[in-house]
Image (spheres, rainbow, N blue to C red):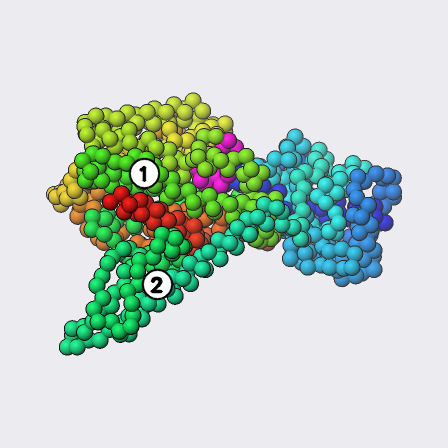
Amino acid sequence: MARSAILLWTICVSLTYGQKDSYSNIMGGIHGLPERVIQTKLLQSQIMDSDYTKPGVRLFSMVSQLSPLNREGFLLSLQDIFPMLKNITQYNVSETCLNHTERFFEGLLDREMWSFRMLDAVGKPPSGLLNFDLSWYGSYEECTNITIPEFRGKYCSVNFPLVKSQSAQSPIALGILPGINIGVCVPSSCSGQDVSNFINTVFSVTVDRINTGNLSLDAGFTTCQENDLKFDTKATVVLVISCLFLALLVIATLYDLVYIQWPKNKTKEYEEIDNGVPTFTHKIRGTEGESQPLLGAPDIGVVAAPGILVQALLAFSVYTNACKILNTHQGPGSITCLNGVRFLSMSWVVLGHAFAFGIGSADNLATYFPEFMKTWTAHAILNALVSVDSFFTISGLLLSYLVLKEMKKKNGKLNWGMFYFHRFWRLTPPYMLLMMVYVPLFRYMFEGPKWMQGGTEKDFCSDTWWTNLLYINNLVKTDKMCMGWSWYLANDMQFFVLSPLMLVPLFFAPTIGLIVCMIFMLATLITAGVISRVEGMPPSMVGGGGTPAGAKDYFNDYYIVPYCRIGTYVVGIITGYILYKTECRCRINRYVNLVCWLLAAAVACSVVYGLYDPINGHPLSLDVSALYNTTNRIAWGVSICWVIFACATGNGGFVNTLLSWKAFIPLSRLTYCGYLIHPIVMFAFYFSHQTPIHYTNFSLIMIYLGFLCLTFMGAFILSLAFEAPFMGLEKVIFKRERSEKK
């Protein structure tokens, strides 16, 4: 009887995704989308021509016969094949799994509801097979809710490669395993290996009966979603640390409210106004160190400035830090338009990733994507890659502008040790603490048919975390990169380390400084061009030219390496130097200003929309692709720099008014934490989704807006917990050192 159940599984067997991919695999695999469309069209033509010698047609024919769930006919077909199963003596599965399988089959024969619910939870061939919709989820929730005294229902997944030579152990990028992927409900005592062994053993003696021709029906990559995932040691330790950290935040906030904020508010109750003149004022020496007199206050003593330990504790106050983040005041000399540029650039990053991360969950990608690429608006998403270059440009511009002003105040002197320490301290605590929480705990937070219970990061970053700490993860062990989107942070830190080579000569000998900048610029132009031409790189992750090998290496060999990305940073440094020299004052003729705006807009549009024809069937040659990869990012950086320069010098008009909107100030403060957390928000949504996502323009808009809101909400929490406290600690420590020196 257990053998009978084995056949039931093999006929129904199934799976969804064997998802083990990280950010880098997802981004690196976008180049495969056009190839998937080609495969879909080939399958369609074979089916329409009734070419039954092709594996795809055999698969279509076989699975289409499984679509009706006629339980009587189904069981009769199962009984018809029993004699063949009796000759099978070895299944290579656990005894408990066999016994529970027999119990499952008995339930079917006795018409017990729970057994048919298990059968009902199995994925069935849906509409859209001609569109290559070969991922059938089934019902995860129905399966996991099944409980009988002997076992619970467990959702498992297995993949049948369409081509026998495909590696069953290596899912391609985007989280998509080539072939048919279906969901199945099995007894909780069965492992993924049990399921694979069942299928392969039974098919070895029944495959001719199923009439699959030359199609391989070997079970490939198999995974199961455990019903009760136990906390491991790493997760337990991190959970304890997180609870202690939360307790520290609560204690600091309560102390701040009771001993600092409440006395401040209490003084207002005693302040009396006589003919518009206070009879006394009572102001307290605050944490910023202001010493203010007390005149005539009744019974409220002067509150002394807190000591160093109390100030350190107050750095973790959620109340004070929230007030700082939400404050819309900016000091004199600030380049206010940068707030809007930061926020809009971060919004663009979220838009591009919202589309890219969901590709593996779409059930109509093969039909939606070709039509999507033909629209002009789509290229604002497909070419959202340059949004990161906006941040490189801003980073270089601000660094140059502020450092040169500081050097001018101090007659060319600067504490270079503090220069590097401040940057490291500014970026690292929220980065590393988020990694500490995310890597071991994320897999316990949600569930679903595609949920990665084995973790989203390879080996839990056990041998790569140090590359992130040293900001070299874009150069070392890139195949195992932890938090793959952190390649940007590594580049930014590497550019920062090199920046004094340009900043110092720009201050003391501007001509030499500009020459050094041009050397860096020329070096990155040549390097990007040579790498792109030699390796046959396409001009974009979604194609437009190049070779298949070049498309595969685009992400690791070109997109994330500093020697191909520093160009926009240098453009920003030069622009910051110009703003420093002009003191943000530059009168430009209105007609010249208009021409510059039109040129900047034309260049920006050519970068974003210039690949419309190449992506839609007219690919660029290798030489032209190399030229595009060499110049497009720098051209984008120049356009962004013009916008900032014009707005900062009073030539921005309504653009400056928009970008300087005060609502952008707190949002711009959250862009760093937003960048850190936004892929995690997307992973949580896409990998816990229990049904395929059907792409439409409106559904993408709604998904994107949801991600954008959740990203900044999560960024606010992350900043309160891990970013703002450590920025406050730095001020407390080094402020005390300065006071002691005095």
Residue 464 point in image, percent of width and height: 52, 35
**Residue placed most toward the observer, 421 or 36:** 421
Q: Amino acid at mark 2?
A: Ile
From where the camera sits, is residue 252 visible? yes
Residue occupying the point 47% across, 34% down: 467
Crowding near the residue tagged with mark 2, few <14, some 14–19, many ≥20 C-alpha atoms within 10 Å? many
Circle 1 SS class: helix
User: How many discs mark residues in the rendered view?
Assistant: 2
Residue 569 point in image, percent of width and height: 31, 35
The quarter holding residue 472 reads top left
Residue occupying the point 43% across, 22% down: 534
Q: Nearer the viewer, mark 2 or mark 1?
A: 2
Residue occupying the point 28% across, 25% down: 519
Task: Judge from the rendering whether residue 581 lies leftward or rightward of residue 16; answer left or right.
Answer: left
Give the residue number, with chain letter if any, for mark 1. Answer: 418
Q: Amino acid at mark 1?
A: Met
Residue stretch rendered in magenta on the structure? 477-487
Which SS type dominates the magenta stretch? helix
- Asked if residue 118 is among those painted magenta in the image, a careful observer would answer no
From where the camera sits, is residue 4 visible? no
Give the residue number, with chain letter if any, for mark 2. Answer: 260
